[in-house]
Image (cartoon, rainbow, N blue to C red):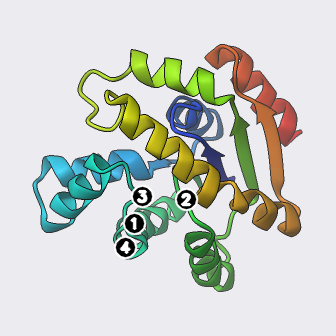
Amino acid sequence: MRIVLLGAPGAGKGTQGRALAEQFGVPHVSSGELLRAEMAADSDVGRQVRESIARGELVPDDLVLSVVGRAVNDAMQTGGYILDGFPRTLEQAKRAFELAEPAGIDADYAIYLAVPDDVVRERLARRAEGRVDDGDPAVVQRRLDLFHAETEPLLEFYRDRGILREVDASGTPEAVRENVLAALR
């Protein structure tokens, strides 16, 4: 099973990604977790990531592709992946597809966790402790604006490939998981 999870910040990609990975027995590859690990290690990549996040901007494509690409290749050794938080731009999606399709590791499904912006704001405010990108309302709004401008165009990309499934992600984690599983049937 190879699934890409899409959604605004706070849509539940991490929560659903972990649950789906456990259910399907494949690794959960979270771009956010990978990038936070780079920041915690204070690597060169981590410092560049920290600067982008602090401004509420998307991390540059080349940085994300290098970090996530290694993790996806590793995940394929166990038969698949649940990819959370990548791609975030149409350019990332196109580049990833160009690399993955010839190797036979492109996604089977792209699940869009649809959630209203006001719910996103509430969720991010609740998880703000310890997350530099969730505590500042101006940064949260910038992230939402970027999501609408940069990530929403991915929906058409995956719709055109015939693999997009859109689910209501505004409910409880359990209700969202049921919506996701129903969309995969």
Q: In the rendered image, which residue does mark 4 sit on? A: 66
Judged by depth in the image, the label closer to the viewer, 4 or 3, is 3
Residue plotted at (41% across, 19% down): 125
The x, y position of residue 130, in whole percent, is 23, 27
Type of amino acid at the residue the image marks with label 1: Val
Query: Which residue, given by chain and number where applicable, does mark 3 sit on?
Result: 58
6 or 128: which is nearer to us? 128
In this view, which residue lies farthest toward the left?
Answer: 42
> From what the image shows, is residue 48 above or below residue 10?
below
Residue at the (73%, 53%) spot, across then down: 110
Contact between labelled residues 4 and 1, with CB atoms less than 8 Å apart? yes
In the image, farthest residue toward the front: 138
- Secondary structure at badge 1 equals helix
Marks 3,2: beta carbons within 8 A: yes
Question: Is residue 159 shown to the viewer in this render?
Answer: yes
The reply, left or right, for residue 106 in relation to residue 84 is: right
69 and 146: which is toward the camera: 146
| Disc 2 target residue | 88
Looking at the rendered structure, the kind of residue marked 3 is: Leu
Residue 67 shown left or right of residue 12 in the figure: left
Q: Type of residue at label 2?
A: Arg
Label 4: how many Cα within 10 Å (few below 14, some 14–19, many 20+): few
> Does 168 appear above or below 32?
above
Q: Quadrant of the image for the C terminus?
A: top right
Q: Which residue is mark 1?
A: 64
Q: Earlier in the sequence, mark 3 or mark 1?
A: 3
Mark count? 4
Q: What residue is drawn where x is 38% and y is 76%?
A: 62
Question: Mark 4 or mark 2: which is in front?
Answer: 2
